[in-house]
Amino acid sequence: MSETAKLTLDGKEYELPIIESSVGDKGIDISGLRAETGYITADSGYGNTGSCQSKITFIDGEKGILRYRGYPIEEIAKNSSFIEAAYLVIFGKLCTQEERDDFAKLLEQNAALPQPMLKHFDGYGSDGQPMAILSAMVNSLTAYDPSVMHPKDESDVTYAAANLMSSVRTIAAASYKASIGEPIMPPRYDMKYVENFLHMMFSKPYHEYVPEPEVAVALNMFLALHADHEQNCSTSTVRMVASSQANMYASCAAGITALWGPLHGGANVAVVQMLQEIQEEGLDPEKFMDLVKDKKSGRKLMGFGHRVYKNFDPRAKILKGACFDMLEKLNVSDPLLDVALKLEEVALKDDYFVERKLYPNVDFYSGIILRAIGIPLDMFTVMFAIGRMPGWIANWKEVHDDPKARIYRPRQIYTGEVERHWVPRSERS
Ligand code: ACO
């Protein structure tokens, strides 16, 4: 007989089925609770809610484990290009050479944006927020690919996935060029994904940018490390939108806007701003810690803490090592790395951080890598969005492929006025 959980409510006992996992947290199925008991469950910020069953990514926050489709993140960071990691996340398996070539062909076909779409960039001001442009333009892709509204079969979904993966990179680079008033560089057909992105970002007419191999390696790793992270804020948003049967592009555009906030993907910008402030104003890291520990200050140590990781974030560990490697190979130094190292050292010895299990997260060191590559600060969260696209697509696909999928519709515990009656405006005080 399968395991159940017992719940006693108002003197009556209820049995709740257990949902098994392959590894990690099991679930208690409360889907029939309201109908049986009249109660719903409350879980602010969804910290204890399993919103779905998924086969994509596994995290053990206590042990600092992250696996895509069962493969440890350390092995992916060491061996995989971003596109190979993306294929794994989206399609659930390591690609054969033939599958890799077919997918690369689709990426190549979709690297250039539809010509009319380029006109959109003229409409944004030079100080247009790149995340606003990215989300709007990704949503606009639907207007140029009507088949995404009702994919007939798996090949339509694969096409949409490749279009989105390829276009997001072109849109990102084009929005940067538009923002600095330079001509938009078309993609090249002889370049790999990451090199092509760097070309579109940094080449100018008659001046071809050729990235150092270390730069392409570091950017591939940065993107692969961001490829998925199970039910975070933006991915849950994608699933929420997908559950209404909205198309892949619209659902992922919603993911981009959710990523934007400083408590999520926007943290990589906030970290660098914080490090710059400390460095430029010559603040003492120990004193800065007093500030972030003082709740009244409204400050946080950006790039520290995580809802799931209560040990270390394995991505932060990998990125910290990559930072040193890259700066050494490019023979550059970044004073912000010294500030970050000092802050980490102080925080890891401080009771406030130890007791609350706050460790560096993925954003703490990633900004230093992006700076070394030459990515401007206001493009940092855009870089995260390019990296996270495979995870959003895979999660959209999981909802789309699930014959039992239901529209997401949480309930609430209402705490407002019970009932009031209309008062004409002239009688209101
Ligand atoms: N600096 C100072 N104190 C912190 C920090 C921080 N970075 N993070 C958490 N705390 C404190 C909280 O104030 C709280 O203290 P209390 O128990 O005295 O009230 C305690 O630690 C628990 O924190 P919560 O806010 O409850 O943790 P939650 O899981 O809700 O939030 C989050 C996680 C949003 C990541 C939080 O740690 C944070 O704001 N970090 C800084 C922003 C950041 O780096 N975000 C990127 C996250 S990774 C990503 O999205 C890619």
Image (cartoon, grey):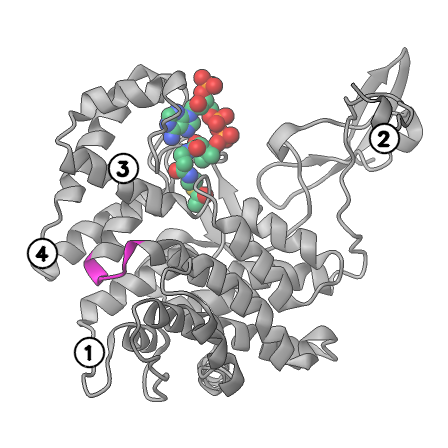
Tell me whether circle 1 and circle 3 mark residues in contact (CB < 8 Å).
Answer: no
Quadrant hosting residue 314: top left
**Residue type beneath disc 2:** Leu
- Determine if the magenta segment contains residue 318: no
Asked which secondary structure carries label 1, the reply is loop
Asked whether 64 or 46 is in front, the reply is 46
**For marks 1 and 3 on the same chain, the one whose residue lies earlier in the sequence:** 1
Label 3 – label 2 distance at C-alpha: 46 Å
Chain part drawn in magenta: 372-377
- Determine if the magenta segment contains residue 373: yes
Residue 271 percent coordinates (x, y):
31, 41
Q: Nearer the viewer, mark 3 or mark 2?
A: 3
User: Which residue is the site of mark 1?
Assistant: 210
Residue 191 percent coordinates (x, y):
32, 83
User: Which residue is the site of mark 3?
Assistant: 274
**For marks 4 and 3 on the same chain, the one whose residue lies earlier in the sequence:** 3
User: Which residue is the site of mark 2?
Assistant: 33
Does ligand 1 reach within 8 Å of label 3's beta carbon?
Answer: no
**For marks 2 and 1 on the same chain, the one whose residue lies earlier in the sequence:** 2
**For marks 4 and 1 on the same chain, the one whose residue lies earlier in the sequence:** 1
User: Which residue is the site of mark 4?
Assistant: 332
Which quadrant is home to the C terminus?
top right
Tell me whether circle 2 and circle 1 mark residues in contact (CB < 8 Å).
Answer: no
Label 4 – label 1 distance at C-alpha: 18 Å
Residue 84 percent coordinates (x, y):
43, 70
